[in-house]
């Protein structure tokens, strides 16, 4: 299928927002390797990172699913607040990783919402 300029691609494995989500999730899940953490921080970062990466894979495989972008925004927000909620703010590297990756995940999710909505509309017009 030829790509028409100005049209959103509905092809699987083609959206940069979803690749960014996948990379952010993997980096978050691996962050306890590089930063000092406690048990709560480690499990929080690994589990939320894996969920973000998994959501990125699902969004890459099925680009017309709009709910994946909303899930991404929620997961990013959870990552952002996790240093305070899980009490690991004393671990500076882990906290900054959570704040930066959480913020970037939210930004990528919000930026991808219009793209996903357009892909969803295009997929429904068969």
Image: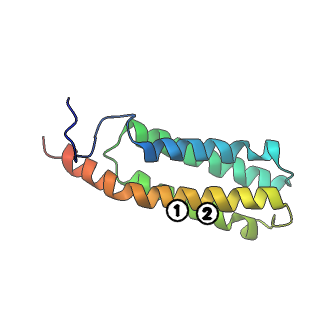
Disc 1 crowd, CA 10 A, few/some/many (<14, 14-19, 20+) = some
Question: Vertically, is 70 above or below 20?
Answer: below
Residue drawn at x 64%, y 52% as measured from the top left: 48
Where residue 85 sits in the image (x, y, percent)? Answer: 72, 69
In front of the other: 96 or 62: 96
Q: In 3D space, how far apart are the residues under numbered discs 2 and 1 (Cα atoms)? A: 6 Å
Residue farthest toward the front in the current orientation of the protein: 5
Residue 85: assigned label: none
40 sits to left or right of 51: right
Q: Indicate left or right for 16 with 20 as reference.
A: left
Q: Secondary structure at mark 2?
A: helix
Q: Residue at x 39, y 42 (%)?
A: 15
From the image, tell me which residue sits under label 1: 74
Q: Quadrant of the N terminus?
A: top left
- The reply to whether the C-beta atoms of the residues labelled 2 and 1 are less than 8 Å apart is yes
* Quadrant for the C terminus in the image: top left
Q: Secondary structure at mark 1?
A: helix
Q: Residue 9 is drawn in which quadrant?
A: top left
Residue found at x 52% / y 47%: 21
- Residue bearing the label numbered 2: 78
For residue 67, what is the image quadrant? bottom left
Q: Residue 5: give x, y in percent of width and height.
A: 21, 42
Q: Residues within 10 Å of mark 2 (few under 14, many from 20)?
A: some
Q: Residue furthest left?
A: 126
Q: Nearer the viewer, residue 120 or 20?
A: 20
x and y, in percent, of residue 89 in the image: 81, 67
Residue plotted at (35% across, 34% down): 12
Picture layout, residue 104 above or below residue 35: below
């Amino acid at each position: 299928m030829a790509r028409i300029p100005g049209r959103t691609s509905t092809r699987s494995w083609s959206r940069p927002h979803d690749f960014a989500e996948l990379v952010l999730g993997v980096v978050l899940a691996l962050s306890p390797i590089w930063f000092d953490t406690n048990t709560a921080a480690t499990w929080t970062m690994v589990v939320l990172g894996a969920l973000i990466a998994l959501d990125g894979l699902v969004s890459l495989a099925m680009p017309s699913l709009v709910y994946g972008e909303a899930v991404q925004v929620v997961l990013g927000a959870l990552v952002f607040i996790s240093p305070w909620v899980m009490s690991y703010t004393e671990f500076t590297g882990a906290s900054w990783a959570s704040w930066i990756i959480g913020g970037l995940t939210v930004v990528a999710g919000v930026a991808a919402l219009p793209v996903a909505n357009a892909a969803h509309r295009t997929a429904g017009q068969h």
